Image (spheres, helix red, strand yellow):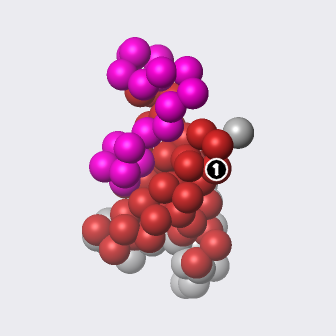
Amino acid sequence: MGGIIYVIVVGFVAGIIARILSPGPNNPSGFILTCLLGIVGAFLATFIGQAIGHYGPNQGAGFIAATIGALVVLFVWNRLVASGMIRDYNR
């Protein structure tokens, strides 16, 4: 249980940092959506890290890996908005 809470907290911070680092006008608007995408990125980094054997079963991704995971999720988000699969409500 502590591992999941750790991933959520790290993902929250990683989402904020990834939004700052991610260029482009298609950034998700809103604090909650940015944090959710960061948390998804942290879980993605944790899953991939555990799959390749870098993390143990009860370990979460580190801060740098979670930030990279959040950047990947934001990149996918930007591509989906650019292709029109996800509607951008700010335009």
**Is 16 positioned to the left or the right of 8 in the image?**
left
Q: Which range is magenta?
A: 50-68
Q: Give the x, y percent position of residue 66.
A: 41, 48
Residue at 49%, 48% (x, y): give it: 41
Mark 1 lies on a secondary structure that is helix
Quarter of the image for the N terminus: give it. top right
Question: 61 or 87: nearer the eye?
Answer: 61
Residue at 55%, 47% (x, y): give it: 7
Name of the residue lying farthest toward the right: 1
Q: Give the amino acid at mark 1.
A: Ile
Quadrant in the picture for residue 62? top left
- Can residue 76 be seen in the rendering of this structure? no
Q: Give the x, y percent position of residue 63.
A: 37, 51
From what the image shows, is residue 36 above or below residue 46?
below
Residue at 48%, 55% (x, y): give it: 10
Q: Give the x, y percent position of residue 56.
A: 48, 21
- Can residue 65 be seen in the rendering of this structure? yes
**Residue beneath disc 1:** 5
Name of the residue lying farthest toward the front: 2
